[in-house]
Amino acid sequence: MLKTLLVIAVGFLPSLISLWVIRKTHLRTHSRLRQAALNLSGVRVRQNIPSTESDRYYLEGVGYLIGDISCKFNAQSGYIRCAVNPSGPCQTCRHYESRKLAGSENRA
């Protein structure tokens, strides 16, 4: 009878160790994700500070836009200026290219 219980206990031992390792790994991963979320939220708060310069425009039918709306790379959005220089400022941007208007093409 004792040998039978010992065989059963030895048979369950790998499963119990595996469950223990899985639980420890899950707790460690959860802790790391929580810490990363806390760190990321602090970074985002600092990034969302409104700029001191007033480069926000209201365009009828579109809404608020930020940045130089005459630039080719302007995102025409109220949240991001452009893909080249998203944080600005537009005045000193070396990637500025004027936007070609639809009606200003050369007609021959």
Image: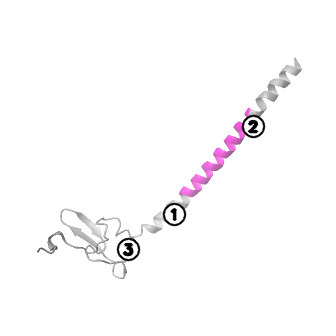
Would you identify the image quadrant in which residue 21 lies?
top right
- Write down the residue under mark 2: 17
Q: Secondary structure at mark 3?
A: loop
Q: Does the magenta run of residues contain 49?
A: no
Mark toward the viewer: 3 or 2: 2
Q: Secondary structure at mark 2?
A: helix
Left or right: 59 as drawn, with respect to 17: left
Magenta extent: 15-37
Would you identify the image quadrant in which residue 18 lies?
top right
Q: Is residue 57 above or below residue 62?
A: below
Point out the tag, 1 or 2, that comes first from the N-terminus: 2
Point out the tag, 3 or 1, that comes first from the N-terminus: 1
Q: Residues within 10 Å of mark 1 (few under 14, many from 20)?
A: few
In the displayed image of the protein, which residue is found farthest to the bottom?
92
Left or right: 51 as drawn, with respect to 31: left
**Residue 51 numbered tag:** 3
Q: Is residue 10 above or below residue 85?
A: above
Amino acid residing under circle 1: Gly
Q: Which secondary structure dominates the residues rendered in magenta?
A: helix
Residue nearer the viewer, 51 or 65: 65
Residue found 47% across the figure and 68% down from its top: 46
